Image: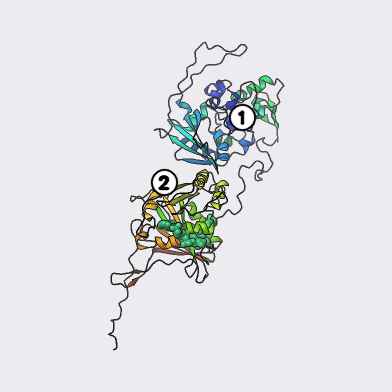
Amino acid sequence: MADRGSPSQAESSNGGPTSQAESSIGGQLNMNLPPPDRLDHDAGTEGGDQITIPTRTLRDLINPPRDLALMRQRLFEIKDKIELQVDEFERYWPYIDNVWVRQHKAGTDKSGRVITDYYACRLQRPTYTPKPDTPRREGQPTRKKQIREGGTCQMRLKTIRYEGGYSGYTILKVGDETQHTHDLDHIDKIKRTSVLMEIARSEVMKGYMPASVFTVMNEDMEKLVAAGGRYLNRNDVRNASQHWRQIHKEELRVHEGYKYDHGNGIVRHDGAPPAIQLNGDTSIVDPALSDVSPLPPGTLRFPESDRAFLQPYLQPENPVINKSGFPHVTLTYATSMDSSLTLAPGMQTILSGPESKAMTHYLRSKHDAIVIGVGTATADDPGLNCRLEGVGGFGGLGWEGQPRPVVIDPGARWLLTPNSRVLQTVQAGKGRGPWVIMAPGFSMDPMRLEMLKFYGGKYLGLTEYDKKWRLRWEAILKALAAEGIKSVMIEGGGMVINDLLQPENANFISSVIVTVAPTYLGKGGVGVCPAPRHDHTGRPQPAVRFQDVKWYPLGEDVVMCGKLRGGQGVVSRPPPAPPMAPMMPMGQ
Ligand SMILES: NC(=O)C1=CN([C@@H]2O[C@H](COP(=O)(O)OP(=O)(O)OC[C@H]3O[C@@H](n4cnc5c(N)ncnc54)[C@H](OP(=O)(O)O)[C@@H]3O)[C@@H](O)[C@H]2O)C=CC1
Ligand SMILES: Nc1nc(O)c(N)c(N[C@@H]2O[C@H](COP(=O)(O)O)[C@@H](O)[C@H]2O)n1
């Protein structure tokens, strides 16, 4: 196969060897962070006096990380904040390190848990015009000198690595530029990723000739392109292995399954299986080769066919905080036929069947935050994460689809410990650290506050309360909106739900999604029964009436969806009362 892209175009082809520390960026990504001054340069080639053992092999090409091309594009564009768990960052970053060049040493905050690194697009560095008479070390061949393109793109990003009760990376664009002045293909043309260089080197180090390694790497062109290798050429493979070959003078052989065909270069043996296909049957996934870890136990599925009925009750696809400054609010809970949430106060009671439980988790994936009262946090010790297949921690990337747990705990009485399920969930990389909303005059125990922060949580102190000394929902929701929360799912418990259904609060509710289970729990539990309403004559009125109502059966349960009229949702006007019989005077 012909080389694509002349060697002189590619830096890795003509740039000569660089340091060995550089080559380890991609392969090992040692998170103890190698000396930054060595990291700040180009990645992906070998050099120095020692040879690092490449950790990337052909398998990384054959069995690339999931959605590699898409992820490369996302990590190139940085349109939105990208959150990745550490293993995911280590998996993907070496496939895009041809674009991003680290600028300066990592900055660590005073807690030592937050490490920030800045990167600039490769084309930000100045144009380099080599001097015509640059001397070379004795014995080294003269190098073809190229002008190195630069100074054309100002895109920059920062990576924030958090190290605590969970570990992860947040990748954000910085600076004024919103996009590159070029596409990803342009960088792929001028610089190879460290993964590709490591793969090439690891194969040569097995004793294979660079030209045959190049041929093997080209076997599955689609995968090579997805890995950024459209312009990989034979010289790249030679450069990647140059230092090793200088030390190991042994004769190299043609890669297994290939032979020399004079005039045609290296070709596959007749009938030999492609080297890229490690097992005969491509439908069998070798677990050792698979980067897709099995889904954790308890992963839930909510069928596509059941999702449509919920659509009108969810926030629009690209939610914005509405003009009034409030997020979309969905009130959702499971109740018995006698409007009870639990058998007894403080006693968690499972009402939802498996199908409606999966629906609840689908709803969680569609909201930025889940809100509960401290009564529920104390009684249930909930996980408050989303366990739906495809969200972060359950087959998805990072924390995508994981809502932020929010606990309303005005008096700081929630006894959160590292054993609390919500924190165990964070530690397992399956949920986010909780936020705690507190009232004025209360403060969290400093040790507990430190622990909360360690797990990526925080507290929000509010000062606005109503005439009953309760925190005002307006203030709670505005505070969440100010933190970037665009949609909130309020789950309970009884006090929270009843409070929200009061006329003065119901305006804030956008949708209600209630699961009704086929059971009477009997008296004595925590009930949903808002305070009664009366008209101006004192006549009783329904407390709340929904509109745009839909009932949908799910397993043995039925789900009621409804809306409240008005901007964010205003309590609908009750239907006109039937005419009352005239009052009869007493004694007649
Ligand atoms: N079936 C289902 O879908 C669900 C069932 N549940 C169940 O509900 C039960 C808990 O309900 P409940 O006991 O009523 O407790 P809640 O979860 O409603 O929490 C109530 C407490 O939260 C604080 N709080 C809530 N709203 C405000 C506000 N606006 N301002 C100030 N403080 C506020 C108060 O704390 P403080 O007292 O410190 O002032 C209040 O006492 C549990 O048994 C749980 O299992 C819960 C959720 C869903
Ligand atoms: N949808 C629903 N159905 C039930 O039967 C319930 N008991 C609840 N309870 C709510 O879910 C929380 C538990 O969450 P995790 O499973 O631990 O993540 C609980 O705290 C209630 O808010 N919900």
Q: Residue at x 53, y 58 (%)?
A: 380
Q: Quadrant of residue 67 in the image?
A: top right
Residue 576 in percent (x, y) is at 31, 71
Please tell me whether residue 216 is drawn above or below residue 503 in the rendered image: above
Q: Residues within 10 Å of mark 1 (few under 14, many from 20)?
A: many
Q: What is the C-alpha distance between the residues marked 2 and 1?
A: 41 Å
> Mark 2 — residue?
484
Furthest residue to the bottom? 588
Q: Residue at x 51, y 37 (%)?
A: 111
Asked whether residue 266 is in view, the answer is no
* Helix, strand or loop under label 1: helix
Please tell me whether residue 118 is drawn above or below residue 321 in the rendered image: above
Q: Amino acid at mark 2?
A: Gly
Please tell me whether residue 392 is drawn above or below residue 11 in the rendered image: below
Labels 2 and 1: the sequence-earlier one = 1
What is the number of the mark on residue 198?
1
Q: Amino acid at mark 1?
A: Glu
